[in-house]
Amino acid sequence: NNLINTPDSLKWLLEILPSKNLGIALAPYHLETLGQNAESIAQLINALGDQIFMFYAWQYGMGCMKKLPKDQELLQMPGRGKLDFKPIVQSLKAINYSGYTSIFMHPVPRGIPILPTVKETTNEIKRAKNYLDANLI
């Protein structure tokens, strides 16, 4: 239900409204719902280049709209679901991406921590970061 929600519409937006102040917050989660895979997301990253201002390290997994068992909710995190982040992070490296990266997921209900304790949440985010870092090589 968005106007700018496909790979082509992202490219067209930047083409129609060129500005150093307009960029893309890229979330693989939303692209996966359109049938995009790791390779097509990597190609999009190459096409968008320095117009990517923020990267959400977030995948579809089993979605985030209904309550699921915690192990299924965590499939949104890098390294847990089906999405291979290697081509994605390698494309970010190739374009010299230096913006913010948010390791991200939506638990259900919204607003609760991804895991019960600060320590568990921190360890999960570190695990995902290590997975992403390992795929930069």
Image: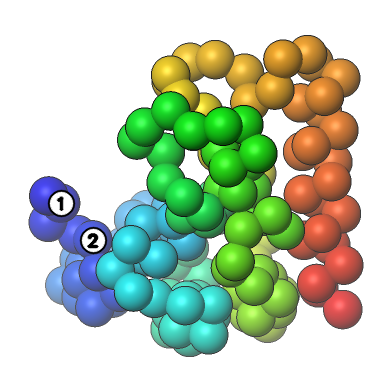
Question: As shown in the figure, which amino acid type bears the numbered disc 1?
Answer: Asn
Crowd around label 2: few <14 · some 14–19 · many ≥20 (10 Å): few
User: Percent x, y for residue 105?
Assistant: 55, 38
* Residue placed most toward the observer, 49 or 71: 71
Amino acid type shown at disc 2? Asn
Mark 1 and 2 residues: CB-CB less than 8 Å, in contact? yes
Q: 12 or 126: nearer the eye?
A: 126
Provide residue 99's location: percent of width, then percent of height: 62, 54
Question: Residue drawn 12% across and 50% down?
Answer: 1
Position of the C terminus, as image quadrant, is: bottom right
Residue named by callout 1? 2
Residue labelled with disc 2: 5
Q: From this viewpoint, which residue is outermost toward the front? A: 69
Is disc 1 surrounded by few (<14), some (14 to 19) or many (20+) residues within 10 Å? few
Q: Residue at x 47, y 61 (%)?
A: 28
At horizontal 64% and vertical 72% (from top left) the residue drawn is 84
Q: CA distance from mark 1 to mark 2?
A: 6 Å
Instruction: Look at the image and tell me whether residue 57 can be seen.
Output: no
